[in-house]
Image (tube, rainbow, N blue to C red):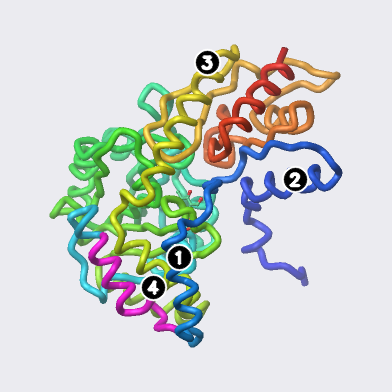
Amino acid sequence: MQLLSDRVLNMATSATLAMAAKARELRNEGKDIIGLSLGEPDFNTPDFIKDAAIQAINDNYNSYSPVDGYADLKDAIITKFKRDNNLTYTPAQIVVSTGAKQSLANVAAVLTNPGDEVIVPCPYWVSYADIVKLYDGVPVEVETSIDTDFKMTPEQLEAAITPKTKMIWFSSPCNPSGSIYSAEELRGLADVLVKYPNIYVVSDEIYEHINYVGGHASMAQFEDMYDRTITVNGVSKAFAMTGWRIGYIGAPEKIARACNKIQGQMTSGTNCIAQRATITALNESPDRVKYMIDEFKVRRDLILGLLKDIEGFECNTPQGAFYVFPNVSAFYGKTFKGKTINNASDLSMFFLEEALVATVDGAAFGNPNCLRISYAASQEQIIEAMRRIKEALS
Ligand code: PLP
């Protein structure tokens, strides 16, 4: 009998974490690697949030919390949803989890039966397809291109729907393309979905505040989609709290209760100190973290300008998040030291070995012609990384 389950054997290792591990290995060998592979703000968690965590420790928050989160954290989430998204939720519709990643895994676990299809517009966040597969769902990839700013059109959505379609999962702002669906574009998708009342929407809004164009739209804001939308959010990105592990959903009550049930058997309530700190983070105005967004925008413009200067990178202009996702197929077929670059994976490896810059193969996000480059790094690092890449390519 084989030792490991088919479930884990059929699962891909997270490409972003794998590249980070490889970069770490090379760093340990003394190589000066610039890491542009991880989706992690390079800022410290703001002091007002850290202070709340210290206070929680001193106040002896050390016991198991309710599985779905402290009542006053849920209140803070409800206030945040109303203030930022004009969405009305009750406490029974909120579940707090160990990062948005667990929120997504919970939703997949409670809504997917074997063979159910989940539409994932490409490029998608690296874990969507594997989380869906873990629960015996079938990810149905919808290809998009730079011409539609990597956004799925209503026609594409309709063409991908089958009697087995259970859900659609997408992020806006999108990791990795940085694209943002406007309210009109979401309405276009909703107009298709209203014809199929059994399809649910997972709207991943974790990059909500990292938005350079203003105006964040949520699918659940449409009255006819509210009862069929699970809104996913968290504090990792906007508040530089990736390691604190707090994510949450606002969802139809039946789905939230099911997530609560499954989480109760898997992990229980998430870290109590992080929950207390999140109350403070969410109760503050998002303006408190605007300095980070402003800096990300400067870096976005910087990296776009530097990439424009290197022949072969074709970029959209990301409107949010902190990644660029250039099409790099112009480099395919080129040879270096006897090795041919056949795909984005080869190119990413070439950049790691020859330029000492870590990026991620776009295939992990469902688009093998692109490379994901994170600009959650200092301006100096971005400038040096692009200089090295240009030099390696020349
Ligand atoms: N959704 C998207 C689109 C992400 O990029 C990430 C993290 O990279 C997550 C969800 C997971 O976030 P968390 O750190 O809250 O688990």
Residue at image point 30% right, 64% down = 283
Circle 4 residues within 10 Å: few <14, some 14–19, many ≥20:
many
Q: Is mark 1 within 8 Å of ligand 1?
A: yes
256 to 42, vertically: above or below: below
Q: Nearer the viewer, mark 2 or mark 4?
A: 2
**Mark pair 2, 4: CA separation:** 34 Å
Marks 3,1: beta carbons within 8 A:
no
- Badge 2 amino acid: Lys
**Mark pair 4, 1: CA separation:** 15 Å
| Magenta span includes 200 | no
256 to 325, vertically: above or below: below
Q: Which residue is more in the foreground, 325 or 292?
A: 292
Q: Which is nearer the N-term, disc 3 or disc 4? A: 4
Q: Nearer the viewer, mark 2 or mark 3?
A: 3
Q: Quadrant of the C terminus?
A: top right
Q: Which is nearer the N-term, disc 4 or disc 1? A: 1
Residue at image point 75% right, 45% down = 22
- Badge 1 amino acid: Ile
Label 4 sits on residue: 259
Marks 3,4: beta carbons within 8 A:
no
Residue at image point 67% right, 17% down = 390
- Badge 4 amino acid: Cys
Label 2 sits on residue: 22
Residue 389 seen anywhere in this rendered image of the structure: yes
Q: Which is nearer the N-term, disc 2 or disc 4? A: 2
Q: What span is in magenta?
A: 64-80
